[in-house]
Amino acid sequence: MLHTLASRMALPGLALLGLALLVAQPAYAQVDRSAVERVVAEAVANNAFEGTVLVADQGEVVYHEAFGFTDVDQQRPVNADAPFGIASITKMFTAIAVLQQVEEGAYALSDNVASLLPGSDIPNADVITVHHLLLNISGLPSESDRLYQAARSAEAMVQETVKKRGKRLGAFHYANVNYVLLGLLIEQADQMPWREAIQARILDRVGMTETGFLAKDAYPDAFAHTFSYTRRDKRRADPAFHIENFHAAGAMYATAADLLKLDQAMYGDLLLSETSKTLMYTSYPEYNYSGYSVWTYAYPFAPSKPNIMERRGSILGANSVLIRMLDRNQTIVILSNNNRFNPDSFGETTSLREALIIAVAQADG
């Protein structure tokens, strides 16, 4: 199901992380490329991964390779610079734009939906705040898959979704409607479509020329089209649907190299102030250790327990993850166009995602 495949995670027992993530940390040894190569080669040999992997150290690329095909018929090999659908990594872009607008005084995190989007007809709009939406604790429900069968505006997606019964305010419930609403809020404040706001506020500023927005039957050149493996290990193209309906919650594409540009831009003040980054990264144990669109935690399966900020994405065959080791400026980007890669593999230390984190985290000084 489309909406249930949007990425989510729960990290029980991890320590709360806040301001300490943003202070200077000790230097670490360089990433061992051979260790990364062994991990990826094993996953590829075991038919556990197709797509592209990028690993960087201090912003410098250590490893960047691609495997598999961009099409279900296996005619076009994946190039390392191929754009992939990034699904819910889109939410990170939306959260950055919201925090920029908060910095500019357009509104406050404590402002409610009723005051910011009058006439939106959202249940509990007078008590649901920007903070609630960013943390997925608004109590609003998940959308139905049928809403992707025809093109719908963001407003229509919201109105159709909120007809369903929701959860209680303050309970963590990962729902795309929260970020679709944040996209509408961005549009209201900037007086332009969400796409144009993200283009101006983030993509143009960072120089992300290979990142953009998806729509049904409208894909960039060399795009890694998604497919899935059946239980009998047959390749099957994913069903056609209106991915643009995900709007600010999941309708973007990017290359691995462009996501590294975003990662590096987040270390300075090009996009957000240190105060805003602290707000974004702060982890709430009571809400499955979520922050504003990201999860930040001390990774428990490596001896050095690196401080990780990550964002995952999953819509059918589009499976991706951006992993940022904040205390050492080391980066992992994994982009796949099929269901053999699971971005939600927390605790499965033999999976590609976990094994790469452990391999990179071994670069201790």
Image (spheres, helix red, strand yellow):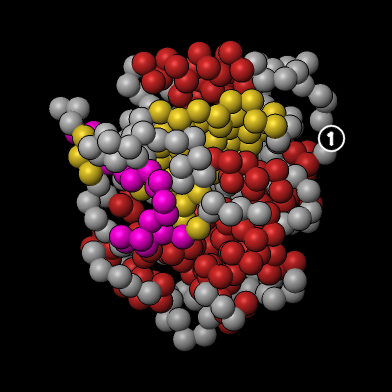
Q: Which residues are magenta?
A: 213-230
Residue type, label 1: Ala
Quadrant for residue 8, please give it.
top left
Query: Please, what is the dominant secondary structure of the magenta stretch?
Result: loop
For residue 40, side relative to residue 31 (left or right)? left
**Quadrant in the picture for the C terminus:** top right
Vertical position of residue 182 compared to residue 2: above or below: below
Q: Which residue is mark 1?
A: 24
The question of residue 220 being in magenta is answered with yes
Q: Position of residue 268 (x, y in %)?
A: 78, 48
Q: Position of residue 18 (x, y in %)?
A: 72, 43
Please tell me which residue lies in front, 261 or 352: 261
| Residue closest to the far bottom | 119
The answer to whether residue 98 of the structure is visible from this angle is no
Q: Residue at x 56, y 70 (%)?
A: 196
Residues 65 and 260: in front is 65
Q: Is residue 267 visible?
A: yes
